[in-house]
Structures are given as C-alpha cells and as structure tokens.
Amino acid sequence: MTVYRVSVVIEKDENGYFAYCPELQGCYTQGETYEEVLENIKDAIRLHIKDRLEEEEEIPRVEMINLTAVEVTV
C-alpha cells in the first residue's frame, strides 16, 4: 500500500463546504460540514488515484504546499 500526499483546498460559503485537490484535475466534492467534506475529498482522491493507476497514468507528487492571502486595492 502506497501513501500519497496531495494538497486539498476547502472553502466555505452559505451553501456548505467545497473541497478540491489542485494536483488531480477534476477531483472535487462538497459537504454540509467540515468533517463531511474532508471525508468526501479523501474518498474522491482515493478513487481518482486508483483510476489513474489502473490507466497507468502518473500520480503527481507534491514537494511543497503554500497557502497565503493577499490584499488587493481596486
């Protein structure tokens, strides 16, 4: 069994939580709570990686994860 480390972005709005994995295009999910969306994205990532392995596609490896906020004056 191989362990993969990928980044996950979780956003919250008035409709609940939305999560996606930037390294795995098309890998996203939603949930009503933070805990639910976190479990959902883990499942989505697991299935996405399994599909890629079955198709003998490369799995991106993350070397560094950086998240920051910027202020922009308009």
Image: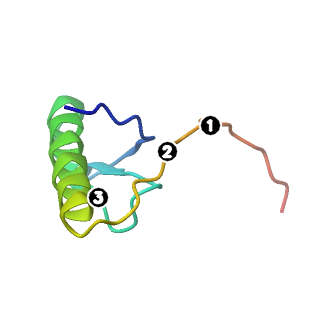
Sequence-wise, the earlier of marks 2 and 1 is 2
Q: Quadrant of the N terminus?
A: top left
Three-letter amino acid code of the residue under disc 2: Arg
The residues tagged by marks 3 and 1 sit, at their Cα atoms, a distance apart of 18 Å
- In the rendered view, tell whether residue 25 sits above or below residue 68: below
Measured Cα–Cα span from mark 2 to mark 3: 18 Å
Could you classify mark 2 by the number of other residues whose Cα lies within 10 Å: few (under 14), some (14-19), or many (20 or more)? few
Q: Secondary structure at mark 1?
A: loop
Instruction: Please state, as top left, top right, bottom left or bottom right, where the C terminus lies in the image.
Output: bottom right
Q: Which residue is mark 3?
A: 28
Task: From the image, tell me which residue sits under label 1.
Answer: 67
Q: CA distance from mark 2 to mark 1?
A: 17 Å
| Mark identifier at residue 4 | none
Residue 55: % across, % down:
23, 70
Disc sitting over residue 61 in the figure? 2
When asked about the image quadrant of residue 36, the answer is: top left
Q: Residue at x 23, y 55 (%)?
A: 29
Element on which disc 2 rests: loop
* Sequence-first disc among 3 and 1: 3
Which residue is painted at 23% across and 36% down in the image? 38
Mark 1 is on which residue type? Leu
Left or right of residue 32: residue 16: right
